[in-house]
Image (cartoon, rainbow, N blue to C red):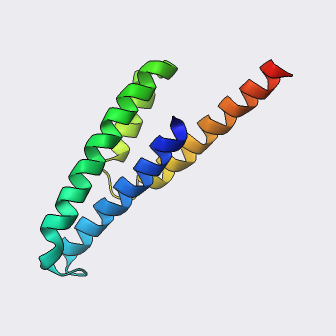
Amino acid sequence: MIKLLRIVSLLEGLSYIAILSVTLGFISRDYVSTLGMTHGILFMIYVIQVLNISHKENWTSKQQLGLMLASVIPFAFIPAEIYLRKLEQSKQQEKETTTA
């Protein structure tokens, strides 16, 4: 589950950067509707995934809020990715110690 969230987080963050690139004039305004729709769908999937996983994993409100903020702050998907990777690795190590 966390791996899917990591993928969606990365795609959502990159789509947000693409939209900001249109605003700054780096990308033509002809792509606004396509980029906007893509980003909107990815954003909704991201929020649903965070809520779903946080409920299943019993994350704290602080963890939830941090990941939600990462979806609206440019480039915050990078620290979110690092955090999610650490969570995934610790969960895998926990599984390995319980099975051994």
Q: Residue at x 12, y 78 (%)?
A: 30
Image quadrant in which you'd find residue 26: bottom left
Residue 75 in the image: state x and y as whole percent.
Answer: 39, 58
Q: x, y percentage for residue 45? A: 31, 41
Does the image show residue 11?
yes
Task: Tell me if residue 81 comes above or below residue 18 in the rendering.
Answer: above
Q: In screen coordinates, is 62 left or right of 42?
A: right
Q: Locate residue 54, reporting x and y percent.
A: 44, 25
Q: Residue at x 45, y 30 (%)?
A: 63
Determine the image quadrant of residue 3: top right
- Near-viewer residue (62 or 14): 14
Query: Residue 76 placed where, x, y %?
Result: 41, 52
Farthest residue, direction right: 100
Q: Is residue 76 left or right of residue 30?
A: right
Q: Is residue 72 visible?
A: no
Query: Residue at left 28%, top 47%?
Result: 43
Position of 99 relative to 86 (above/below): above
Which quadrant does the C terminus fall into? top right
Relative horizontal placement of residue 67, taking residue 32 as reference (left or right):
right
Tell me which residue sits at (70%, 33%) in the image.
Answer: 92
